[in-house]
Amino acid sequence: MTDEKNKKNKDFAELLRESKLKVTAPRLRVLNEITQKDAAISQPDLEKIIGKDIDRVTLYRILSSFEEKGIVHKIFDLNGTATYAMCTSNCTENHHHDQHVHFICSICNSVYCLNEVSLPRINLPTRFTLHSLAINAVGLCSSCQKED
């Protein structure tokens, strides 16, 4: 195992402990795979990558627990498939603060978190309380841009 991978696993192990989750090889593997891509990743794609190492039910439970603990957030692609990305702000159990614009490519269907794009301020009527805000931008990602 490389030094970089060891450091990553230590960081992931610390993240799991802080979230009051047991540090297990399947959880570390899922965290590693989620962080390998620039875009969010779906459960079916994770299943293809991980293969028979982690069964479908276990993977579902891992992703659900990560979402519940504020480790990842879920974004739906254009086909309605849930994709997962790491939370980058101080998300806590059942309360995600990781609100940003998501860009979905209309060709490859990849979902990207645009942390640097500010969300608009929403002025709600009296007696309305905002719990979350989801804005999806749809277009072509840099990989799918066609040169003229």
Image (tube, rainbow, N blue to C red):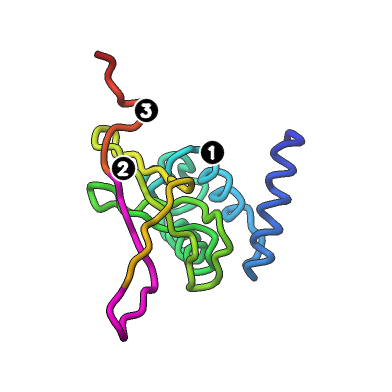
Q: Residues in magenta? A: 124-137
> Which residue is denoted by mark 2 in the rendering?
104
> Which residue is denoted by mark 1 in the rendering?
36
Question: How far is the residue under mark 2 from the one under mark 1?
Answer: 18 Å
Q: Earlier in the sequence, mark 1 or mark 3?
A: 1
What residue type is disc 1 on? Gln
> Residue 22 at what x, y percent from top left?
65, 65
Q: Any magenta on residue 131? A: yes
What residue type is disc 2 on? Ile
State the residue in front, 84 or 48.
84
- Give the SS element for disc 2: strand
Residue at 48% from the left image edge and 71% from the top image edge: 95
In this picture, residue 43 sits left or right of residue 35: left
Query: Can you say which quadrant of the picture contains the C terminus?
Result: top left
State the residue in front, 116 or 5.
116
> Residue 35 at what x, y percent from top left?
54, 43
Residue density around tag 3, few if under 14, some if 14–19, many if 20 or more, within 10 Å: few
Question: How far is the residue under mark 3 from the one under mark 2?
Answer: 11 Å
Q: Is residue 103 above or below residue 2?
A: below
State the residue in front, 38 or 8.
38
> Which residue is denoted by mark 3 in the rendering?
142
Q: Earlier in the sequence, mark 2 or mark 1?
A: 1
Residue at 29% from the left image edge and 37% from the top image edge: 105
- Give the SS element for disc 1: loop
Residue density around tag 2, few if under 14, some if 14–19, many if 20 or more, within 10 Å: many
